[in-house]
Amino acid sequence: MPIAPLALLLLAATGQTMIDPHGIRAGGVRIDSAGVHAPGGSVGAGGVRGGGAGRGTTILTNGGHRSVDCRSGTLTVNGNGNTLDVVNCARVTVAGNGNTLTIRFSLPARLALVGNRNDVSWRASKGTRVSASNVGARNTVRRTVWS
């Protein structure tokens, strides 16, 4: 089922659906020309955006190419074979396999690799502390210089 009919079905199930020139709204979810927006984040042409501090974004898909802005929240990658450009996360957990991540940390953060065969390159702004753990198998983790 294409994403738009699925989203409309979800909105209809929430009750009190409103359709106006700006899009469709129901139960805290909004669909408009920029994408799908919910209290926990949004998906649009610019990629996935988390909901901010205390909120999390989870990638469940396989084989995707996208940018993720955690907005000081968290990111969990459960999918496989994704290529992700990640910014502004307080915590990144990679539980899937075969993912490629480029991460830019600008606040104290935690990086945890639980899955296998992931390729992670990360950098942090000056003075930013990042703790990393790698309990998966055959992961590659590289810290690069902030430019």
Image (cartoon, rainbow, N blue to C red):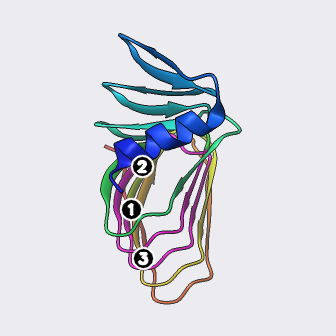
Where does residue 94 sit, x and y in percent of width and height? Answer: 54, 68
Where does residue 25 sit, x and y in percent of width and height? Answer: 52, 22
Number of numbered discs visible in the structure rendering: 3
Give the mark nearer the N terminus: 2 vs 1: 2
Question: On the image, which quarter does residue 72 sit in?
Answer: top right
* Residue hosting label 3: 118
Residue type pointed to by label 2: Val
Residue drawn at (38%, 44%), measured in percent from left and top? 5
Q: Is residue 75 magenta?
A: yes
Quick one: 109 or 7, which is closer to the camera? Answer: 7
Residue type pointed to by label 1: Leu
Q: Is residue 72 visible?
A: no
Q: Position of 120 compared to 76: left or right?
A: left
Residue drawn at (63%, 22%), measured in percent from left and top? 16
Q: What label does residue 86 carry, if any? A: 2
Name the residue furthest right: 54
Where does residue 67 sit, x and y in percent of width and height? Answer: 35, 46
> Mark 1 and mark 2 in contact (Cβ < 8 Å)?
yes
The region drawn magenta spans 74-101
Pick the quarter of the image with the C terminus.
top left
Quick one: 51 or 15, which is closer to the camera? Answer: 15
